[in-house]
Image: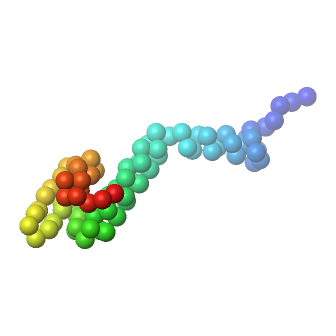
């Protein structure tokens, strides 16, 4: 009697492949940052605040009375909060 062959397609093989695909820390981290970026850009868009990505990896917010550059998503979130942009 032999055990199940995990290299063949099927429930066991699919489970093994899914586990290896979704436990990569790079994929998990990039997904969270992409989601946060989308949420913050949507907040800014609803408030009609133009946000541009800079070549250094930061973000620039431009309003008639304000031009603010922030280094990362955390800075972008803090800036939107200071401007009173609701989540």
Tell which residue pokes out farthest to the left in this image.
65
Mark yes or no: residue 31 visible. Answer: yes
**Which image quadrant is residue 17 in?**
top right
Tell which residue pokes out farthest to the right in this image.
1
Q: Is residue 41 above or below residue 15?
A: below
| Quadrant where the N terminus is found in the figure | top right
- Left of 20 or right of it: where is 25? left
Q: Is residue 18 above or below residue 57?
A: above
Q: Nearer the viewer, residue 42 or 37?
A: 42
**Which image quadrant is residue 42 in?**
bottom left
* Residue at position x 19%, y 58% in the image: 83
- Left of 13 or right of it: where is 45? left
Q: Is residue 5 above or below residue 62?
A: above
Mark yes or no: residue 79 visible. Answer: no
Tell which residue pokes out farthest to the top in this image.
1
Q: What colour-coding does the image apply?
A: rainbow
Q: Is residue 27 above or below residue 52?
A: above
Q: Nearer the viewer, residue 47 or 74?
A: 47
Residue 68 at x, y percent in the picture: 13, 58
**Which image quadrant is residue 2 in?**
top right
* Residue at position x 18%, y 62% in the image: 61
- Left of 67 or right of it: where is 77? right
Residue 71 at x, y percent in the picture: 20, 49
Residue 30 at x, y percent in the picture: 41, 48
* Residue at position x 55%, y 43% in the image: 22
Residue 78 at x, y percent in the picture: 23, 50
* Residue at position x 50%, y 40% in the image: 24
| Quadrant where the C terminus is found in the figure | bottom left
């Amino acid at each position: 009697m032999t055990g199940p062959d995990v290299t063949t397609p099927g429930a066991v093989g699919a489970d093994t492949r899914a586990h290896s695909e979704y436990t990569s820390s790079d994929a998990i981290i990039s997904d969270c940052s992409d989601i946060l970026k989308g949420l913050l850009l949507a907040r800014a868009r609803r408030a009609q605040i133009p946000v541009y990505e800079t070549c250094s990896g930061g973000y620039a917010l431009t309003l008639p009375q304000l031009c603010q550059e922030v280094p990362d998503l955390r800075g972008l979130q803090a800036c939107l909060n200071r401007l009173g942009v609701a989540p």
